[in-house]
Image (tube, grey):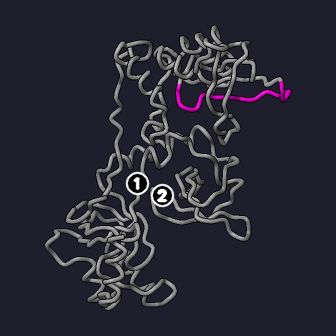
């Protein structure tokens, strides 16, 4: 049991827990309320966020119905920022009700779309939202603007596709990352990260260091430093962090204290997929960069393909990498794959290697 001490918005509260003699931050786990008007302090600090339709109405509803009242909470999780999340119930006995349902049914909150997509949202909440939509209550009385957000091109059924690309990073003589020419998500994420840099400056901030986590990493490009999306690969013995810049393909080792900071949720790869696609030249085998022939192969690929608009025929995917044939011009001419083989810097895989690659592609 707790007492609501302060209402930040319709679904986020400061609670006093008498039995533990403490205060906690609490947010409803399955719903989102619109942003209310900013307070004077936020405006003076320049941190004000624009109010959304029915944000003030949602906050007012919570102030009237739960502020300074005893409630019952069920905690189901906690955010990285230390905010406890879960369900909140108001009233006693026959009057006890789930406050999330009350907000959604009144059109003052929406069910978190991610919870719906993952099948985690309770059916009663979804039904309440559908009823509010049908009756055009609250939020649903305002015409909903559907954002035509660009999506990064995906190649789940990549076979026989021919796309125009530019190579963004060369890892070896047959391994590289590329960007699709004309992919709107490239401009969206580039502009978004420029804005992220303007808003946050170039100072690092504490963030969770976990392999696979996508964060913002600082990269010096010429005379200026900017934040880019990066996936943490590993933490080195010297306290540094190795990261992969997911929109370009390059790998760098950075200082976690000064060159990493948390990424805005709206910029996560679940919202805007990684722009750079990892690929290997189909039907080619090259030596590693540690060997002279392997280094020559990478230099040859760089000399032929770097900075040019290329055509790539996509044959499928194996171990998370696209299998491609590259062309400098017309797809009917000799491929870059062939040129590397002719130069003696690559070879065609033998039968066993082809069989193993085929198994990886089918798994």
In the displayed structure, 7 sits above or below 74; it is above
Q: Residue at x 56, y 41 (%)?
A: 264
In the displayed structure, 6 sits above or below 227; it is above
Dot 2, how many residues are within 10 Å of its Cα: few (below 14), some (14-19), or many (20+)?
Answer: many
Q: Quadrant of residue 243?
A: bottom right
In the displayed structure, 31 sits above or below 359; it is above
Which secondary structure, mark 1?
Answer: loop
Residue interval drawn in magenta: 19-32
Q: Residue at x 57, y 45 (%)?
A: 263
Q: Nearer the viewer, residue 244 or 8?
A: 8
As drawn, which residue projects farthest toward the front? 94
Left or right side of 323 for 215: right
Label 1, on which residue? 275
Q: Residue at x 62, y 32 (%)?
A: 86
First in sequence: mark 1 vs mark 2? 2
In the displayed structure, 122 sits above or below 208; it is above
Q: Position of residue 81 (x, y in %)?
A: 68, 39
Task: Identify the main secondary structure in magenta.
Answer: strand
Whether residue 206 is in magenta: the answer is no
Q: Position of residue 135 (x, y in %)?
A: 36, 12
Q: Position of residue 88 (x, y in %)?
A: 63, 24
Dot 1, how many residues are within 10 Å of its Cα: few (below 14), some (14-19), or many (20+)?
Answer: many
Q: Quadrant of residue 140?
A: top left
As drawn, which residue projects farthest toward the right? 21
Q: Position of residue 154 (x, y in %)?
A: 32, 55
Q: Quadrant of residue 294?
A: bottom left
User: Do callouts 1 and 2 mark residues in contact (Cβ within 8 Å)?
Assistant: yes
Which secondary structure, mark 2?
Answer: loop
Label 2, on which residue? 246
């Amino acid at each position: 049991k707790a007492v609501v001490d302060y209402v930040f918005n319709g679904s986020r509260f400061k609670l006093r827990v008498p039995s533990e003699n403490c205060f906690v931050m609490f947010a409803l786990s399955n719903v989102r309320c619109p942003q209310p008007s900013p307070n004077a302090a936020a405006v003076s600090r320049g941190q004000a966020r624009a109010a959304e339709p029915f944000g003030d109405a949602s906050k007012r509803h919570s102030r009237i119905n739960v502020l300074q009242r005893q409630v019952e909470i069920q905690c189901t999780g906690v955010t990285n920022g230390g905010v406890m999340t879960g369900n909140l119930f108001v009233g006693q006995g026959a009057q006890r009700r789930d406050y999330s349902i009350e907000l959604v049914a009144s059109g003052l909150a929406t069910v978190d779309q991610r919870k719906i997509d993952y099948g985690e949202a309770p059916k009663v909440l979804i039904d309440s939202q559908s009823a509010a939509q049908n009756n055009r209550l609250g939020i649903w009385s305002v015409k909903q603007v559907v954002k035509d957000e660009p999506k990064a091109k995906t190649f789940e059924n990549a076979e026989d596709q021919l796309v125009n690309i530019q190579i963004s990073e060369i890892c070896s003589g047959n391994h590289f990352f590329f960007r699709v020419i004309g992919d709107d998500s490239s401009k969206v994420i580039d502009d978004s990260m420029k804005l992220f840099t303007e808003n946050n400056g170039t100072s690092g901030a504490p963030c969770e260091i976990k392999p696979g986590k996508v964060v913002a990493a600082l990269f010096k490009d010429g005379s200026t430093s900017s934040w880019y999306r990066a996936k943490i690969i590993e933490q080195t013995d010297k306290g540094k962090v190795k990261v992969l810049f997911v929109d370009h393909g390059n790998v760098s080792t950075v200082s976690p204290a000064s060159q990493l900071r948390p990424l805005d949720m709206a910029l996560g790869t679940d919202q805007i997929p990684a722009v750079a696609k990892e690929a290997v030249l189909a039907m080619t085998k090259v030596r590693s960069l540690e060997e002279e022939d392997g280094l020559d192969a990478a230099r040859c690929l760089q000399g032929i393909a770097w900075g040019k608009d290329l055509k790539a025929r996509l044959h499928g995917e194996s171990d998370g990498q696209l299998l491609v044939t590259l062309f400098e011009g017309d797809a009917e001419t000799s491929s870059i794959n062939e040129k590397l083989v002719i130069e003696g810097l690559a070879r065609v895989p033998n039968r066993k290697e082809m069989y193993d690659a085929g198994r990886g592609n089918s798994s």
